[in-house]
């Protein structure tokens, strides 16, 4: 296989402290060699080995590709009216999901695929090289299955979220819907999904229902994750730790006991700044989580209702401004933190042997991602060492 040397890197974020300074493993005047889609050498540019190909980065900063571990990109329509209403002072609740369910059910497979492809291109242009894709806007056996099948064409991180809310036709039969989501719907979804998720919160599913659905998924070989404590605290964090969920996502409302449980578990606290921004909800204190010893990730929560963004850089900037993270902590959370939330060791960093997924910035420091919010700072994105 040919080797590709990327040189004249002004600042290289490796996320490997053994390779550079601090938690981000920073190197200045660096170079990186890629072979067969993986990183095989990193060091000072002056000491770089010969390679078959050479790309001059021009003194710019290079970061690992963003890992977006929480997204809902399989849907149709939008919810502009709902957003405008919230901005006029109305409060957010989970009920708006049902309008997207109606639009998604009415859409063709080609329409759903085209919308997901559009969002995938947005992710990629914004430096996202790995993203998760949930179902949850079909809520029938056929619609959940086709949503997952479409998602699986674009990412390996596919999540069954049949338990997003109770389907409208089951509004008078919650027990029946829980049985469906943990039975026939799960059976149809399992062949297309890697993960199972439940929205465990006020207006969605309670702890007992979530335990039943997640347990059924685990028995079918799916790995658990959970929407936890976005709207209220009904005990979802404790359930996440009990079931060894890979991540508990949102974490807006946290008790001391919740933070202690996360800090002493394998469950990542995945924070979704775009959701708080778009719903005018309180922001969780990420530094409080880190200080306790919890692992923190940042994700977009890309969805048409409460966080319609594909920009991890925007989410990173909000996390710095409103969640009390430093720029370095936020970048780690948006890269290696996201990889940890997906239980992946091959992405989110640029250590030796890692997948060569990275973004070249239009800046000489990663700090610009928070310092210049809203500015498109990704010059180019590489996936497996190839320009994407």
Image: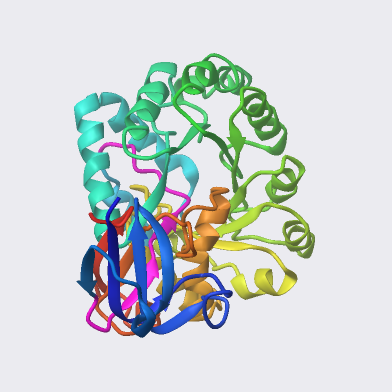
Check if residue 71 falls in the magenta segment: yes
Q: Nearer the viewer, residue 54 or 289?
A: 54
Residue visible at 50% across and 72% down in the picture: 330
Percent x, y of residue 142: 39, 17
Where does the C terminus fall, quadrant-wise? bottom left
Q: Is residue 80 above or below residue 158?
A: below
Q: Tell me, what colour scheme is on the image? A: rainbow
- Residue that lies at the very extreme toward the top in this rendered image: 184
In the shown orientation, is residue 208 left or right of residue 126? right
Residue at left 24%, top 78%? 362
- The answer to which quarter of the image holds residue 67 is bottom left
Residue 352 in picture, x, y percent from top left: 48, 62
Instruction: Estimate the x, y position of residue 385 in percent, counting from the top left.
Output: 30, 57
Q: Which residues are magenta?
A: 57-77
Q: Say if 56 sits above or below 35 in the image.
A: below
Magenta stretch mostly in which secondary structure?
A: loop
Query: Relative to 27, is 113 above or below?
Result: above
Q: Is residue 41 magenta?
A: no
Residue found 47% across the figure and 50% down from its top: 70
Closer to the camera, 307 or 356? 356
Q: Residue 50: image x %, image y %?
A: 29, 70
């Amino acid at each position: 296989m040919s080797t590709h040397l990327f040189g004249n890197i002004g600042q290289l974020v490796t996320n490997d402290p053994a390779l550079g300074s601090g938690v981000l493993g920073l190197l200045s005047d660096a170079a990186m060699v890629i072979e067969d889609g993986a990183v095989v050498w990193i060091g000072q540019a002056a000491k770089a080995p010969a390679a078959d190909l050479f790309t001059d980065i021009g003194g710019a900063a290079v970061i690992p590709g963003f890992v977006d571990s929480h997204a809902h990109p399989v849907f149709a329509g939008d919810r502009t009216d709902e957003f405008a209403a919230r901005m006029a002072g109305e409060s957010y609740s989970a009920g708006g999901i049902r309008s997207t369910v109606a639009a998604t059910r009415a859409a063709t497979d080609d329409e759903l695929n085209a919308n997901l492809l559009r969002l995938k291109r947005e992710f990629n242009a914004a430096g996202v090289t790995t993203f998760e894709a949930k179902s949850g806007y079909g809520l029938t056996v056929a619609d959940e299955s086709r949503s997952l099948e479409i998602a699986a064409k674009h990412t390996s991180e596919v999540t069954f979220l049949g338990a997003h809310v109770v389907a409208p036709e089951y509004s008078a039969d919650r027990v029946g819907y829980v049985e469906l989501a943990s039975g026939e719907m799960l059976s149809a979804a399992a062949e297309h999904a890697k993960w199972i998720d439940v929205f465990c919160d006020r207006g969605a599913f309670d702890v007992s229902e979530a335990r039943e659905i997640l347990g059924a998924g685990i028995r079918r070989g799916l790995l658990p994750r959970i929407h936890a404590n976005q709207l209220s605290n009904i005990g979802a964090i404790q359930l996440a730790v009990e079931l060894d969920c890979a991540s508990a996502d949102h974490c807006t409302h946290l008790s001391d006991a919740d933070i202690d449980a996360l800090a002493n578990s394998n469950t990542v606290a995945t924070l979704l700044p775009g959701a708080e921004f778009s719903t005018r909800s309180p922001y969780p204190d990420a530094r409080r989580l880190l200080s306790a010893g919890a692992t923190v990730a940042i994700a977009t929560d890309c969805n048409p209702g409460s966080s319609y963004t594909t920009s991890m850089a925007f989410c990173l900037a909000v996390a710095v401004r409103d969640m009390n993270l430093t720029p370095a902590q936020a970048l780690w959370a948006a890269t290696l933190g996201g990889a940890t939330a997906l239980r992946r060791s091959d992405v989110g960093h640029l250590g030796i042997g890692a997948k060569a997924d990275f973004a070249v910035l239009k800046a000489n420091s990663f700090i610009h991602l928070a310092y210049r919010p809203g500015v498109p700072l990704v010059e180019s994105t590489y996936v497996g060492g190839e320009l994407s």
